[in-house]
Image (cartoon, helix red, strand yellow):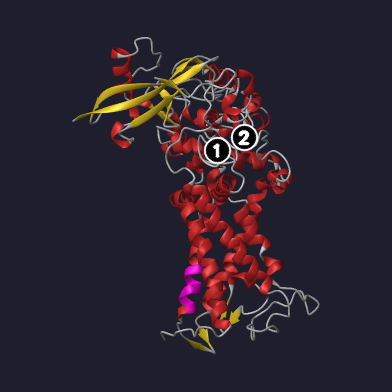
Amino acid sequence: MSYQLNLRIWRGNATAGDMVDYPVTVEEGEVVLDAVHRVQATLAGDLAVRWNCKAGKCGSCSAEINGRPRLMCMARLSRLPRDAVTLTPLRTFPVIRDLVCDVSFNYRKAQQVPSFTPPTDLAPGEYRMRQADVERSQEFRKCIECWLCQDVCHVIRDHEDNKNAFAGPRFFIRHAELDMHPLDTLDRRTQLREEHGIGLCNITRCCTEVCPADIHITDNAIIPMKERVVDRRYDPLRRLFPNWRHKPQPDGGQP
Amino acid sequence: MANAPAAPNNARQTGTGTSGRAPITARTLRTDAWWAYPASTFTVLLAFVLYSTYAALANRDYYADPYLSPFYSPCLSTNCGAVPGSAGAPHLGWFGNWWIVTPAVLILIFPLGFRLTCYYYRKAYYRSFWLSPPACAVPEPRHRYTGETRFPLILQNIHRYFFYAAVAFNLILTWDAVIAFDFDGHIGIGVGSVVLVINAVLLWMYTLSCHACRHVVGGRINNFSRHPVRYRLWTWVSRINPIHGRLAWASLVWVALTDLYVRLDAAGVLHDPRFV
């Protein structure tokens, strides 16, 4: 069954913009991205919008729907008000045009995270791990890099000046994924604290709330990494005694 | 069709108004009841703070044989039992007669510190008291933010020490629950016995589901297969960790209700019904 929806889309660029109302006919079962495509096809051919898979797997169509960061392709219209829906670009990153943002901040941060560093005496193909050892990290591999967690994080959303000193939730799970890996030999805790600002996170869990991949970012990545930073930096008992637990083992793994 | 004009650029230099971002004047476009969580959290936490402050400072009506209020356990001063509504209260006597103010202040710092630095409560009070932020994608009122990198919030990092203390307190409160079945040398069951048992169970569940506990028992190791016992412990804690927030609320409300029950019983307002 179809009905008329007033889709309010922010149109503009970095210097000026307006909310523009588009009355569009939508069908039961459609998602916001369907309505946007209909607007683009019938009412505003020059509307700039980034999208790709329409299946919640590519992370391209991130936007703010009624003020909440979401993927347009995963936001069912049946779960939104029937009269009007507001659509804006991500409000943490510079806008390019209409719904398209410049998210290069995230790629610059990605470059700063050291990649997986296996023991030097192990060649690719010689890695042997048990499932129990890697399953914790596997959850973090579900990340589709939609940047919704980065967008909603108030540390940079409300404080532009923190962008230099803060990597954001997506890169905390990247650090966690690597630090918890049994064959990774780098101690990432110092970088995490000093360069990527995990101490700025105050655990308000918005990143977890918006994650379309249902990654438990706060409970399974940020808090465990905060506790590992405490091990190294703030726990007097663990500072008094040698930190032997984090030294690589003779066979290349960590305890 | 255009409406909601953009603000001039020179007025937009912070937060979502930072130059370069989409110039949208509305601070938030959320239309749902985003204020409900911070408002309800503020109300419940404030009610608990007011009640617990009253209960701690009252220094009376905390023991009704065999029930001891969790706010006064363990009683460290020999003055325990010398105030109205505390006759017969067991005490350790570490602080002698010279300690004349309420003995509750000697011990409450530990459970209070555990909850104050708890990873769940941080979300609760950062959102509801500090408005930092009040809700997701709703801007916070302050222009400057340093998170937990400076004093006093850097002290959140000692949460694990409060966890250790909480375990000790749970052992004591468990013992209080056990002796709540001892009615003058005879085993019995009263409503207060059940209340104290539920209190101890909820506090254990809340404490053991804690993120610091999860880290200490096994979260800090990377090779679970080499530490099967710690892996098993970590798995158990991980199973209840997702309901840590609910346990936090349940144990908080119940510990206050437990004190209230003992208080009313000790003051003679109600008579403890006995099942056995």
- The verdict on a common chain for dots 2 and 1 is yes
Compared to B39, does A48 lie above or below? above
Q: Is residue B197 magenta?
A: yes
Secondary structure mostly seen in magenta is helix
Q: Are marks 2 and 1 in contact (CB under 8 Å)?
A: yes
In the figure, B182 relative to B210: above or below?
below
Task: List x then y, in percent, for residue A134.
Answer: 45, 35
Mark 2 to mark 1 CA distance (whole Å): 8 Å
Q: At which x and y percent is residue B151?
A: 73, 43
Q: Which mark is on residue A126?
A: none
Q: Position of residue B199 (x, y in %)?
A: 50, 68
* Amino acid type for the residue under numbered disc 2: Ile
Task: Find out whether residue A181 is within the magenta segment.
Answer: no
Write the start and end of the magenta stretch as one range.
Answer: B192-199
When the figure is inspected, residue A88 is found, relative to residue B199, above or below; the finding is above
Q: Residue furthest top?
A: A46
Residue A92, position as x, y percentages in the image: 54, 25
The C terminus of chain A sits in image quarter: top right
Farthest residue, direction left: A1
Q: Amino acid at mark 1?
A: Ile
Category of crowding for the residue at label 2, using alpha-carbon neighbours closer than 10 angstroms: few (below 14), some (14–19), many (at least 20): many
- The answer to whether A26 appears left or right of A211 in the picture is left
Say which element carries label 2: helix
- At 69% from the left edge and 80% from the top edge, which residue is drawn? B80
Q: Quadrant of the N terminus of chain A?
A: top left
The tag earlier along the polypeptide, 2 or 1, is 2
Residue A198's label in the rendered image is 2
Mark sitting on residue A222: 1
- Judged from the image, the secondary structure of the residue bearing numbered disc 1 is helix
